[in-house]
Image (tube, rainbow, N blue to C red):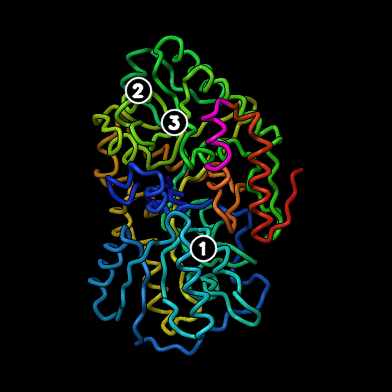
Amino acid sequence: MKSPGFLSSGSRRRAARNATAALSLCAVTALAGCASATSSTATSSSSGGAAFKPVKQDNASQITVWTDSTRLPQVQAYQKQHPGVKMNVVTYDGSADGSTYLQTKVQLFDRTGKGWPDVVFGSPTDVTWASQPTKPNAIPFAAPLDQNLVPQTTLDNFAKGSLTACQSGGHTYCMRNDIAQVVLWYNKSLMDQWHYQVPTTWEQYQALGLKVAKEHPGYLVGSVGDTNSQESYFWSSQCPAFQLTNPTTLRTALQDPKCTRMSKLLDSLISAKAVSTQGFFSQGFAKNSGSKVLMANGPSWYGQYLFNTAFKTPAKQITAAAPLTWSGESTAATGNVGGGVWMVSSHSTNLKAATDLTTWLTTSSANQSKAPTYPAYVPAAKAWLTNPDNSKYFATDISSVFQQAAGEVWTGWSNTKFSDATAWSSVVLPALTAGKTLTATLPAWQSAIADEAKANGYTVTTK
């Protein structure tokens, strides 16, 4: 389940698109805009490469907008505020749950030479193909926004690393709608009642989890049973499971110490029954165990969509702490479980209107302050945090934690042509259910990732 942002993203990626969807991991993925960040670096419009040449423009022409149902009210709000802009709004799946509907349609439009939407909401995974030509001598579907469309000063105001998933070949092909930075959620009421200190390191988290298992059997400090759990834990450990060393080469090296340190830590907590192998969003979990979740390392949307909506934990009990560090490391790194993107079509005959809409959707504080998930644009995120609807549920002020974590997402977990959830779900989760350890399952997980990468045209390295 990705964040409600793609509620990707993601989903997350991944915050269910609605309260009911929050109970389904896949549904949340749709809300979150699932997908991971790529490892490319940001560059300005002065970067190398051929200059973008727009098609013949007509600033009075109608723009067609494809959006998911979650973002539809925001598009309608823009339409109401800008009655002079002619818009044809189409609702589609938003690339949720790994859908390739958008890609398939664009390939059809490329063949027929017509039909492209001007603006689309999608997942970061869409950028992997939308920023590349679908056939020789064709132009990519997505327009490079840093080439005289969006000011660099605007792009520079997105959270650190949040546009990495939008970048390819030195240019920026999308604007991030939301992010789902991972933080440490905990039940403050229980922590205070039991006189436990909130951990700041992974080692302290492990020690507290073992103590909880002994002193309060049945209570949990986490789960690894959801389709996005690897993004909360292994991404936060800087494990090179999905690391693009260049656009066509994927490094998946799960014997790296930054992978095994997390697998061993989790194995000890799983063995002690402090970390569940049943997913938070699996059937029956909320009813049977939702009230016994003391801590959860997970995305920023967990507060509202997991604890509030799914677990129905009373208000003023849950809050969040900053991402955990490892002993000996002074800088925290964290994962991202969701977040969607907006793209402008390079085929648009009204780039002015298309770009203005995309900019408003992602950067307008008035719009984003009411968004379901945490905005990627820093000024809009501040407005989001001041909206009482986004904070009144929590036991303490989560603003500084969210802001800190937003700038600490590790960019070494890359956005690829395929979902990072597939191998985890098909190989790792069944192994855990069968009683195998995470550490023992790492080779099989790595092989599954490598096979999927090769099938998608990547060269794979495991060192």
Q: Which numbered disc, 2 or 3, marks the residue closer to the eye?
A: 3
Label 1 vs 3, first from the N-terminus: 1
The residue singled out by tag 2 in the image is 292
Answer whether labels 2 and 3 touch (C-beta < 8 Å): no
Which residue is disc 1 drawn over? 126
Q: Is residue 331 above or below residue 269?
A: below
State whether residue 214 is above or below residue 451: above
Amino acid type of disc 1? Asp
Classed neighbour count for the residue bearing mark 3: other residues with Cα under 10 Å, few (<14), some (14–19), many (≥20): some
Q: Residues within 10 Å of mark 2 (few under 14, many from 20)?
A: some
User: In the rendered structure, which disc, 2 or 3, sits on the residue that comes first in sequence?
Assistant: 3
| Residue found at the very far right of the displayed protein | 463
Q: CA distance from mark 1 to mark 3?
A: 30 Å
x%, y% of residue 203?
57, 22
From this viewpoint, is residue 377 visible?
A: no
Q: Nearer the viewer, residue 225 or 128?
A: 225
Quadrant assignment, res 166? bottom right
Q: Is residue 430 magenta?
A: yes
Of residues 316 and 251, the one nearer the viewer is 251
Q: Which dot marks residue 278?
A: 3
At 59% from the left and 74% from the top, the residue drawn is: 134
Q: Earlier in the sequence, mark 1 or mark 2?
A: 1
The structure residue drawn at horizontal position 31% and vertical position 61%, both measured from the top left corner, is: 69
Front residue of 384 and 120: 120
Tell me if residue 38 is in the magenta stretch: no
Residue lying furthest top in this view? 215
Q: Secondary structure at mark 3?
A: loop
Residue 456: where, in percent of width, then height? Answer: 64, 59
Residue type of the residue flagged with mark 2: Lys
Secondary element under disc 2, as helix, strand or loop, is helix
For label 1, the SS is helix
Residue 212, x across and y down, in percent: 44, 15
